Amino acid sequence: MKWVAALFAVMMGFLVALAAPTGTGEDGRYLSPSEMALSPDGRWLYVICERSDQLLAIDTHTRNVVKRIAVGHVPRGLAVSADGRQVFVANSWNDNVSVIDAETLQLVKNVAAGFEPTSVVPDRPAKTLYVANRLSNDVSVIDLQSGQEIKRLAAGRGASYLALSPDGEWIYCTHVYPAIGAFRTPPESEITVISTATQRVVDRLPLHNVAGVFHAALSGDGRLGVAANLRPKNLIPLAHVEHAWVFGNSLTLFGPDAGGVVEVPIDELDRYFARPWGVAIAPDKSRLFVTTEGSDSITVIDIARLLEFVRTNQRSVANDLSASANYVVARIPVGHNPRGIVLSPNGKQLYVSNRLDDNIGVIDTATDKVVSTIDLGSSKTVTPLRRGERIFYSARYAFQGQFGCANCHIDATFDGLQWDLEPDGFGVDIVDNRSIEDLMGTEPFKWNGGNPDLPTECGPRVEKYFFRSQSYKENELTDLVTFVFSIPVRPNRYRLPNGELTPAQERGKAIFERTRYRDGRPIPQTNQCAFCHSGRKYTNQKLADVGTGKATDRSPLIDTPHLPDVAYSAPYLHDGSARSLEEVWTIFNPKDTHGVSNDLTKDELNDLIEYLRTL
Amino acid sequence: MKPSIWMKQTLWAASIVMVLAFASAAEAPAMPRYLWENFTTTNGLPDNHVFCVLVDGARIWAGTENGLGLYENGKWKTLRPADGLAHRAVLSLALDRRSGDVWAGTMGGLSRISAGRIDTFTQLNSGLSNDVVYGVGTQDEYVWTATAAGASRLNTRTGQWALFNERNTPMYEIWTYGVSPGPDKVYYAVWGGGLLEYDVTTERWKDYHDPDGENEIVLLKDQGLIHEITTSVSYVDKIVWVATYFGASRYDGRNWHNFLQKDSGLPSNFLNFVKAVDANRAWFCTDKGLAYYDGANWAVYRPAIDTHKPELLVRNANGKTSAVQVNTAPAHNYILGIDFQGDDVWVATADGLSHGVRQPN
């Protein structure tokens, strides 16, 4: 009955959340400040607000917001030109970059980029703009004068953050999703290195056993690069959380000072600092600051000690949690979900964006204390939705603060990994991590359909099997579920602007909806694509045996997954064994048990996939 | 002793021959000469059967029957399936000059080599029409492939594939052998199916065929494509050059001009590959040597058919052929591919890779 009550409360909360303004910024929305950048002289602090679609200009002398500039939808990337005259904002849901005149603080123009641009960097003369596109897995090279994209460079999966070397010669690109590799192999990622002289990718630094990689930064002399990343232990049962085997939070060091690519942990033996996200290096290269967004803190590292440790050990020590004691010198508690981090030019002030508090913390680097907070003009009222969002992004509920919902659902999406979740032995019931966008009406949950509703999915399951720690309070669970149900589906890039389908997509739709084999025989209803994948979310919310079960699965019955934005969430099938949509039918459907596909030509299968990409 | 009439006649005849020979040599045009350096497995090439070659600045890629060779800084490195390559037999290569990515068509799919990372596309894991990729070419964000089951086009920005075959083009044979994308047109050599043209603006296809049909005897020489069995196409400066198993063709959009062994400098009518330099100059890879055409004159580089000694034959615009003394030749006279490195050429042969170092004439 407890969960029935919780479900009722969630539904009411969600309705209230929908009916009322969903936030409290000037236009009724929260701000959610994330990325920040300073003007070269340190006078202006620019902040992008993901939720209110704004760029804020803050006078660092008065610490007041002097201008709010409307930009595109869900801005995620921010940069200032070397001369300070232009500000660039990557609008992740508009697939473009806003160019803003820093003097007038007016929008000059928008230039088109790839799918979901999340980071932007101009070259030194601000003639060329580089944009990391998270969903097209590439970097756009844009001529700023013409506003035209010159070319795309193949990056890794989930290309998300860019860093320009101090000499302006190199751009480093990190990725929030791992490469799609062979089934049940350790995750691999890369740092893509681009030459601004040739505008080509010149190197790919391999990151082994690394999945989500966030910001990177370089020291002023360019000799030390640091990237913040996650090391998931997804090949062993999640039940090993008490053995410190779920996530490691680490830094990748690269460049001459590191002597190669080196992984070092920032966790401690009995305490974790979840999701290292933003990175700032002191101008004198004395210290390194890392926001740990799941732990509401900043980790401070002594660089000389860090490099001495690396030189002494001559190897990556990311799994040795005792290592951090050699170089971590402070942990600074800050607000909820700290993300962006920038240092003043003299290195004396450290600014941190507390994304879920709608403010900016100012830290005195001499004392490592928060000395003031810049209020961004948001209401102090905290709605259930925001409370739920804070819970979603917090790691404090897990044993020793190891991880939170957002570890696997990066930015409320997925992580591209397959997990061994249950305490049922090694390699049993492997499951792919599904997207959690637009979940309302897709119950039940779990690939085996074991959880009838979201309170059950997010409540006892997470507490018992995932976090192995305290239970959510009833109101916390209600808030969390309210937030999860509010996660919207991202814009689909494969539909034509007018909403119509291309001829190939139309042909694919006909295949998806067909009821007969090519030879005219009727296809049994339960084996028609549109029967199981029916309704607005393309799921009939029932279990089905589509022949994809493995000997290691306890049941061949699989929950019919919802399909919106299926194009982006590879790999596929319940265990992630299909690395692409094509493989779902070319490899894993030999007996036509997962829909009828073996009478299709290659053209027709391509058409079907073109249609699926539009869902 | 007076010379006999027989002796007089003989001397006279010999003098005429010498004069003619001298005159012939004097008429020989100054065709490019090369010092040929040959690479085989003995000096690091992955395999001696080289299907294709690609010049990438100072780097040379060689697609062989047993791996993709990369020659850089005087050393060979080999990529094979263990490194992520789609298949060990590499049939075609293309360079995306904007990104620097190299695309390799293999017997088992299409691979992209990008700053050391290899991404592979197959008929099972992608929209690629068939794993046997005979030809590959790049055009802005598109990668065009010629496969054993029609043509495929990958949009590298969206990941979307378009297939072209008998269902949506005039491709009555689907064994596409070569592709040459240009900014306005894309041409396909369809083995047994003539030449296909894709108009980038109208997105329409047009087919060109041998007016004689599949007749091996040329009845109508310059009235169309020389033969249906096309193996390679090269589109440069709005001119299409086509290689077939029965001669070569040049098409300027209005007129055809065909080349046969009997009336050109081609050493054979059996052509594996053609690559144009510009609207007037092209290289032809045949089973009997490498031929160069400068718009009027011809040169053939090869080991002599009979003696296997280095040979350079020059044929002038009047059809006079002369032999030029040379000391080196390509590794083999069965030529499969060529690419240009400034004034130098790199040549794929059935028995090694050859580097033609341009020499002053």
Image (cartoon, helix red, strand yellow):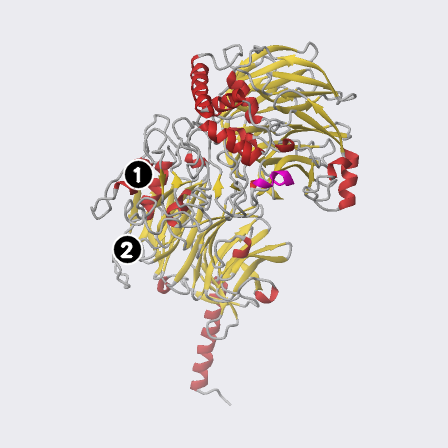
Rate crowding at label 2 as few (under 14), some (14 to 19) or many (20 or more) other CA atoms within 10 Å.
Answer: many
Q: Mark 1 falls on what kind of element?
A: helix
Rate crowding at label 1 as few (under 14), some (14 to 19) or many (20 or more) other CA atoms within 10 Å.
Answer: many
Residue at 42 percent of width and 31 percent of height: A452
In the picture of the structure, the residue carrying the numbered disc 2 is: B210
User: In which quadrant is the C terminus of chain A drawn?
Assistant: top left
The subunit carrying tag 1 is A
Q: How many marks?
A: 2
The disc labelled 1 sits on which kind of residue? Phe
The disc labelled 2 sits on which kind of residue? Asp
Residue at 48 percent of width and 40 percent of height: A432
In the picture of the structure, the residue carrying the numbered disc 1 is: A512
In the image shown, does A404 or B339 lie closer to the viewer? A404
**Quadrant position of residue A161:** top right
Marker disc for residue A589: none
| Cβ–Cβ under 8 Å for marks 1 and 2 | no
The kind of secondary structure the magenta stretch mainly shows is helix
In the image shown, does A529 or A440 lie closer to the viewer? A440
User: In which quadrant is the N terminus of chain A drawn?
Assistant: top left
The subunit carrying tag 2 is B
Q: Is residue A511 inside the magenta stretch?
A: no
